[in-house]
Amino acid sequence: MPAASVIGEPCVLLKLGEIVLKGKNRHQFEQRLQNNIRNALASTGVETVLWQRSGVIVIRAKSAAVDDVERVAKRLEDVMGIVIVHRCWRVDKTVEAMTQAALDMVGEHPASALGGSFAVRPRRRDKRFPITSAEIGVSVGSAINVKFGLPVNLKRPDLTVSIEVDRDEVFVYTDGTPGQGGLPVGSSGRGLVLMSGGIDSPVAAYRMMRRGLRVDYLHFSGMPFTGPESIYKAYALVRELDKFQGGSRLFVVPFGKAQQQIKAAGEDRLAIVAQRRLMLKTAEVLAERRKDGALITGDSLGQVASQTLINMTALDDAVDLPILRPLVGMDKSEIMDSARRIGTLSISELPDEDCCSILAPRRPETAAKIADLRQIEKRLDAEELAEQLADSVQEHHPVYGAE
């Protein structure tokens, strides 16, 4: 956004995506998104005004300062349900004002300094405005061409100047920043993520938030037989993911003694799958107490021994709640690319002593039989043990941006 002064006000224009395809319940999604936007902007310390029109949300900073508007725009890039974030000028409803705003924005754009091509995309929402869209495009485009000498390219321009004539004002903006897309967090219910310290589960959490699910996180620590490093790592991951929803909760269960019991109760090759089943049972107890509708894991089909199709079926048998696996069809490189983009990869790659290292058989079972696993759980009294583990949970509240 240019620092130059124009006859108008800097603001943020948000373009919505999937929400606009909703039917009679569309207003519920829009209301949820507006609430999420307000909650996200509370952390910026900028006082704002929000209003919505068809498919678009406008955010004004009460200070009308360019720096405040930039802070607002940057924060909104992480809010689910927004497709594009535009830094724009809200100007008077005159050709002179929209032309001046366009000239200022083109002058600050890198494509202008490089002599790139441009196009003007006018849209006249208010059909009462006496000048047509085509006439606006010619008038503003001519002024840009005269001042900067840039060539016009309507098919593949290096720079696009968009002008939207609304009922009371005009919005002028150039290229926007991609948002997260998807649906507003909270519009699809609640879920509980089984959060390891690895690469996969944070990406699974992100993908479910993007589908409108509000998530909490459950981490199983190997304590008292491992150090607290895995807890610190899970905390850092949840804190980073909190930028997408706010108000995240991390639950930590000390799982080391339960792992010892599993090792003593069954065949060594079944230990990993038996452990995963007990984790899911514990997660189900906690989820039911919190009224979460599903469990979420970072399983990817065939990635490790416990994630074969047969073993996944055995895991599904452990609980009644649905288990969502948003990464099931992704390969490791795709998951790593996603983790890098959302900011969790560097945290996941930090060393720690994972609880799974306590139960690491030389040859883990890739085709576990459900009947054998149930026998192990009968010796453990797994249902009662899951209740005890859920009772031992420690709750944390990682906040994005907090030290």
Image (spheres, helix red, strand yellow):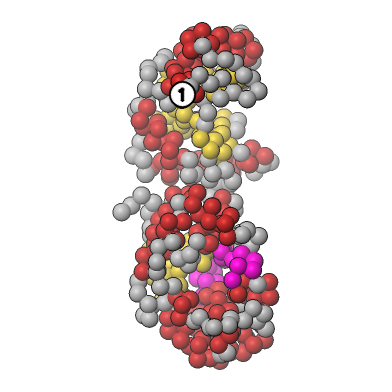
Q: Decide: is 143 above or below 164.
A: above
Q: Quadrant of residue 130?
A: top right
Q: Quadrant of residue 309?
A: bottom right
Q: Decide: is 147 above or below 278.
A: above
Q: In the image, which residues are magenta?
A: 281-304
SS label for mark 1: loop
Asked if the magenta segment contains residue 251, the reply would be: no
Q: Quadrant of residue 296?
A: bottom right
x and y, in percent, of residue 261 in the image: 48, 88
x and y, in percent, of residue 326 in the image: 61, 59
Q: Decide: is 244 above or below 355.
A: above
Q: Which residue shows up at 35% across the image and 27% down it? A: 65
Residue position marked by numbered label 1 in the rendering: 109
Asked if the magenta segment contains residue 284, the reply would be: yes
x and y, in percent, of residue 73 in the image: 44, 35
Is residue 232 in view from this perspective? yes
Q: Which residue shows up at 58% across the image and 46% down it? A: 183
Q: Which residue shows up at 52% across the image and 75% down it? A: 279
Q: Find the residue positioned furthest to the front.
A: 114
Q: Quadrant of the C terminus?
A: bottom left
x and y, in percent, of residue 60 in the image: 43, 29
Query: For this view, does 401 lie left or right of residue 125?
Result: left
Query: For this view, does 370 lie left or right of residue 398?
Result: right
